[in-house]
Amino acid sequence: MTTYDRIYAVVRQIPRGKVATYGQVAELAGLVGKPRLVGYALYRVDMSIPDVPWQRVINARGEVSESPLRNGTDYIQRAMLEDEGVEFDHRGRVDLSLYKWRPPDTVIEQALAAFRERFDRERLDQ
């Protein structure tokens, strides 16, 4: 399984009406400290295929990350989340205490196993 496949496998588990942060997805994919990698992976998702709900991943401040490189998908992302019932405050932030996804223990256990595997592989390569 590639790194991007692991990221997409985590994102596929985020339920409708919930969000996760880039850092949270990175940790659950066994990629601790690599939230930007999650952003790169999600940037490559074909939006016409609903298989990976990329819109459910936001930044740690509870905001949709805006960038001119996104060609307007930041506005689409917010609209998609609002359609799922996620509410934004007047600052454009989601209340993570209400909407942040709390994965089941099995997902956390899988993340720990993936992290251990990656850690062991990097240690052997040294």
Image (cartoon, helix red, strand yellow):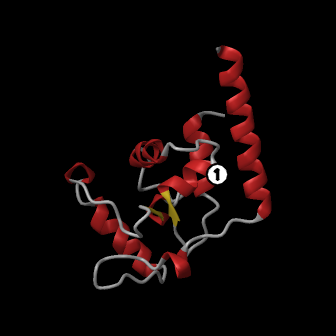
Residue 17 visible to an observer of this rendering: no
Horizontal side of residue 89 vs 86, given as left or right: left
Between residue 26 and residue 10, name the one nearer to us: 26
* Image coords of residue 91 (percent x, y): 28, 79
Per the image, label 1 sits on a secondary structure element best described as helix
Q: Is residue 39 left or right of residue 114?
A: left
31 shown above or below 20: above
Q: Residue furthest left?
A: 68
Question: x and y percent of residue 79 in the render?
Answer: 35, 75
Query: How far across and down, in percent of the image, does residue 43 sit?
Result: 39, 47
Q: Which residue is mark 1?
A: 28
Q: Label 1 amino acid? A: Leu
Query: In the picture, residue 104 is in which quadrant?
Result: bottom right
Q: Is residue 115 above or below residue 21?
A: above
Above or below: residue 9 compared with residue 76: above
Residue 85 percent across, percent down from the top left: 48, 84
